[in-house]
Image (spheres, grey):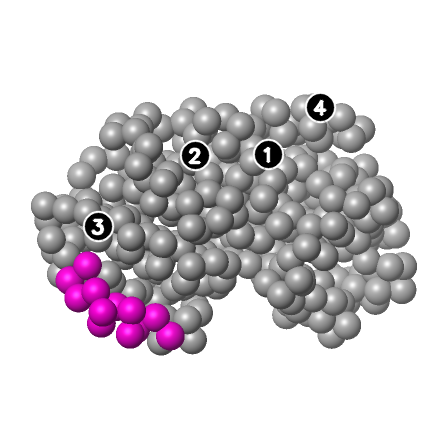
Amino acid sequence: MKPRILILSYALGTGHTRAAQLLSGELKMLGTEPAHVPLETWVPFEYDFIFRTGYLLLATRFPFVWDRMYRSRFFSSKEALAPPGMRARARRRFRSLQPGKWPLVVATQINAMEIAADWKRKEGSSTKLAVVITDYDIYPGWARPEVDRYFVAHEDLAEDLAGLGVERSKIKVSGIPIDRAFEADGAVSLDPRCELGLRVDRPVLLLLGGGLGVGPLEEALRASLRLPEWQIVAVCGRNEKLRQKLIPLAHAHPGRLRLLGYRRDLPFLMRGCDAVVTKGGGLGLTEALHSGKPVVAVAGFPGQETANIGFLASKGWIAVCSSPEEIPAVFGSLPTERVRPPLQAGALKRIAGELVHLAART
């Protein structure tokens, strides 16, 4: 009988959801029966309004408030993010998914982990719970005794998690799961410059705003245009309003600036560019680092994105701009050759294999 695995994500950005989708596909290839269920399709309205809508509102409109909340001991010292009544309602909704029929539940986001852990504690279930952390930061709320296995990006993060009381035997240093295409070596068969109508004799800067196309993308683009030798490909993600707003800027720089919407061929674009400018999402930064090109991170959302940038910068793996205006100065000092940082390749396959073994042992 094929092991059945329930995967939970929550769309606070696209990275957590993308990780869940990738794991679902990989697990299916390994002969299991995975089911990916996003929280936003079943949690109570008030829960979704506070955590998803509220997060995006605070992070984009009132970032200083979100930063204070994220770093405050008042919030980080609490066992759970949601208040008791809201946790109970979310747990009841989760019960309707009949999670007890699944030998293994996998969470790629902290709210998803919290609801599953609450249910497991309340029901006294023998269902295993695994967590895949897709950031370079360990928030105290991740430490729950109901979790049977953690997957983290780096050994330093494993030590941070163990410092919160998690048994070291439960923690696997796996890397962050990304699409295999980002880890592929070799030149592309078709130069993105040709496909996008750019000159082949001038460098290309790939400017990314994440799947949602949020953060200081417009400011970063205007600053990047002050780099006279560089051609720019700006990916606006699902933010069509922003892409439309920037069209006059593209008309003002014909042959030098290309505006793109949501793309599924980012591995192709990354391998064909000469540098990447991106915001602080854990998955997006990992994808860019595996390209082997210089990566410049622009401070975007506070909280986990700021922590991601700080961690990678402390290792010397990325350059950092505290504001988009610094992009030209940072590019003036970028190395002409860059060695890939020692991130673990094959994280997707590694994590999926561990999950299959964990599910089979229940």
Considering only order in the chain, which callout, 1 or 3, is on the residue closer to the N terminus? 1
> Relative to residue 150, is residue 86 depicted above or below?
below
Residue 295 percent location from the top left of the image = 38, 39
Q: CA distance from mark 1 to mark 4?
A: 12 Å
Amino acid at pointer 2: Ile
Q: Look at the image and tell me whether residue 56 can be seen.
A: no
On the image, numbered disc 3 is attached to which residue? 228
Could you say which quadrant of the image residue 71 lies in?
top right
Considering only order in the chain, which callout, 1 or 2, is on the residue closer to the N terminus? 1
Q: Secondary structure at mark 1?
A: strand
Q: Nearer the viewer, mark 4 or mark 3?
A: 3
On the image, numbered disc 4 is attached to which residue? 168
User: Do the CB atoms of the residues marked 1 and 4 lie less than 8 Å apart?
Assistant: no
Q: CA distance from mark 3 to mark 1?
A: 40 Å
What's drawn in magenta, residue-wise?
A: 245-256
On the image, numbered disc 1 is attached to which residue? 152
Classify residue 264 as left or right of residue 286: left
Q: Residues within 10 Å of mark 1 (few under 14, many from 20)?
A: many
Classify residue 68 as left or right of residue 285: right
Amino acid at pointer 4: Arg
User: Do the CB atoms of the residues marked 2 and 3 lie less than 8 Å apart?
Assistant: no
Residue at point 24%, 61% (across, down): 257
Quadrant containing the C terminus in the rendered view = top right
The label on residue 318 is: 2
Q: Residues within 10 Å of mark 4 (few under 14, many from 20)?
A: some
Residue at point 21%, 65% (across, down): 253
Considering only order in the chain, which callout, 4 or 1, is on the residue closer to the N terminus? 1
Q: Secondary structure at mark 2?
A: loop
